[in-house]
Amino acid sequence: MAEHHSDQHHSHEQHSHGHSHSHGHHHHAPTLTNLNRAFIIGIGLNSAFVIIEIIAGFTTNSLALLTDAGHNIADVAALALSLIAFKLTKVKADKQFTYGYSKTTILVTLVNAVVLLVGIGGVGYEAILRLLKPEPTQGITMAIVAGIGIFINSASALLFMRDKDHDLNVKGAYLHMASDAVVSLGVVIAGIAIYFTHLYWIDSVVSLVIMVVILYGTWSLLTDSLRLSLDAVPRDIDMDKLKAGLAKMKGITGIHHIHVWALSTTTNALTAHIVIDENLSAVEEQQLKEKIKHQLEHQNIQHATLETERGNLACKQEEC
């Protein structure tokens, strides 16, 4: 990514001594071509399904199908936003955006979570109204259309399955699709039950159960993306372990001013002041920096900016 500019003088050295491991460092980031394809297929499939749902919803007077169509339109928009965010991570940094645009992946995840929560609120309100005053619906048509939905949403979720644990944005897309498949399954069950029993309140009860399922999945997405938006330490990084690991390295006598934050949903950065042994030569100091950066890469920190201080020149700032 473009942030390498500032670190160019050591980045090539890092690769020269870390070549044997380099394939291990970046295996976290999902490849753009795979994701590109996944997002485009997902958008195509879901757009087609929305059209089917709207037509079926109007012809059968089924509010459940129309509500679900609205929910699916939000999902298509979410997938499109995620795709744009991924494209932006590849845009080179410039004078105004020195880190590039990779943070858009975090903002998009946050927007996705908020949109899902708003959608849940709308569906909940509608479900309660219909629980109080049930309206007749055509159960069997509902079930057939929702059955198509299970197939389309499951297929879409599978596209994101492989990369979902490596990137918050992909996890968002995966959760959207997986929760939609659950929604569709609920609608199928409700449709069949309504067809046989003519108990129209079943529709609303199923909607409320589905809402709880979606809420549970969305909450962690919302809190994670909010934390990263506020530059919190990413969940998979243990600061105590990180500090202890650095403090054990030969030549380091102290560490302070450590900051770790996320540059995107897949890339993390660190800045730190490292107090080094005053007897180290300039070459040894440079080698130590390379070692530190190499160790940090193993802990999922791809961009490290280190300021070294000599042990005999005490740090003047209060925090030290």
Image (cartoon, rainbow, N blue to C red):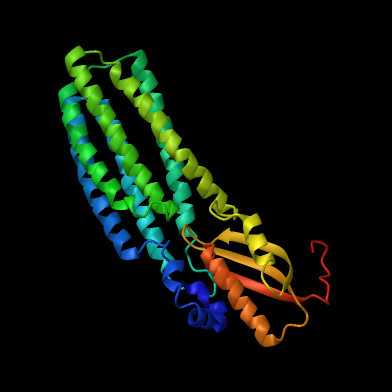
| Quarter placement of the C terminus | bottom right
Going 43% across and 31% down the picture, which residue do you hit? 121
Residue shown at the point (36%, 29%) measured from the top left: 210
In percent of width and height, residue 231 lies at 59, 55
Describe residue 211's horizontal placement relative to residue 65 as left or right.
Answer: right
Viewer-closest of 134 and 305:
305
Toward which corner of the image does residue 130 lie, by quadrant? top left
Foreground of the two, 36 or 283: 283
Q: Is residue 273 above or below residue 107?
A: below
Q: Is residue 304 above or below residue 147?
A: below
Q: Is residue 137 visible?
A: no
As drawn, is 142 to the left or to the right of 167?
left
- Rendered image quadrant of residue 89: bottom left
Check the image and report above or below for 197 versus 262: above
Q: Which x, y percent locates residue 78?
A: 37, 48
For the question of whether residue 192 can be seen, the reply is yes
Left or right, 98 with reference to 60: right
Horizontal and vertical percent position of residue 209:
37, 25
Is 83 left or right of 51, judged from the image as shown? right
Q: Whole-percent x and y of residue 300?
A: 52, 62
Which residue is rendered at x = 44% and y = 39% of the image? 218
Q: Which residue is located at x 47 percent, y 44 percent?
A: 221
